[in-house]
Amino acid sequence: MGRVQDKVAIVTGGASGVGRADCLLLAREGAKVVVTDIDEKNGQAVAKEIGDNAIFVKHDIGSEPSWENVVRVTKEKFGGLDILVNNAGILAIGTIEDTSLELWQKVQRVNAEGYFLGCKHGFAAMKERGGGSIVNMSSIAGIGGSSSFVAYSASKGAVAAMTRSIAAHARFHGLNIRCNSVHPDGIKTPMVFNLQAQSGGKQSQVRMNDPKQVMARFSEPEDIANLVLFLASDESKRIQGAELRIDNGYLMWAD
């Protein structure tokens, strides 16, 4: 207990899935948590579940004024910012042949531009505070690529590259701000299961229903939250600009 005691955290996409797990675990370990999401009902429920050490702020991460509001409210309520978990995102099916420019831009607005805005305004707030930790949720699709998710893969690759750039900037300027990226494979969240249902693909359904495949490929939200907590805490104070896979070795194969 107390691994992030009295630290102040913003968690985007905190209303469900991994974001909810992040919020609950950070709060249990002593953090004051700002839960943000476009889903007002479930976001408020998460903040209520945590209690006095949490608030909910409705948040469109692709909007700079929305980010400015979240950071302002965080400072007013809790005095500053120590931890930013860029977790919110969208997942859309589409290969290079059938992805429209409209879909591409929609995914980049949230997954790439939204994370850029979060890092930009979060970094400034942490600089005022004297330090902090940014955790960016990427994906193994941003490292290895996924043929069925061209826009998503590109957006998560951008997150990984941006993370390294931010980490280098902080290090070279002697700033006590760390920035690392987390790269899961599938996670058992409403977003993933909804996408599986929409796709109607026989192969994907088999993979989701086969216990061995689920155990091998899909993580629980709490598995990701445990890594996020480590990166948010001072336990990881020497980890900077890292790409941490949490995929049970999926990118490796047997000869």
Image: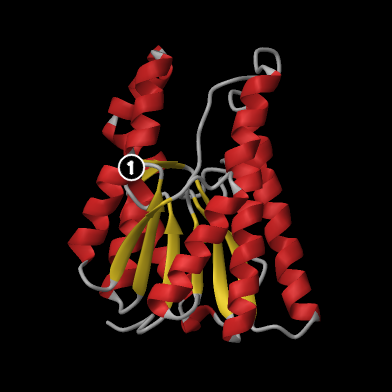
Q: Quadrant of the C terminus?
A: top right
**Viewer-side residue, 204 vs 107:** 107
**Viewer-side residue, 24 vs 68:** 68
**Residue at (76, 63) in percent of width and height:** 165
**Viewer-side residue, 37 vs 27:** 37
State which quadrant residue 187 falls in: top left
Q: For residue 182, say whether it is visible.
A: no
Where is residue 159 shown, x and y percent of the image?
A: 65, 50
- The kind of residue tagged 1 is Met
Figure check: 33 above or below 16: below
Instruction: Judge from the rendering whether residue 62 lies leftward or rightward of residue 175; answer left or right.
Output: left
Figure check: 164 above or below 1: above
**Residue at (26, 73) in percent of width and height:** 28
Where is residue 104 shown, x and y percent of the image?
A: 66, 27
**Residue at (68, 60) in percent of width and height:** 163
Task: Say which residue label 1 marks.
Answer: 215
Q: Please tell me how crowded label 1 is: few (under 14), some (14-19), or many (20+) other residues with Cα within 10 Å.
A: few
Where is residue 129 shown, x and y percent of the image?
A: 57, 84
Figure check: 15 above or below 204: below
Figure check: 37 above or below 93: below
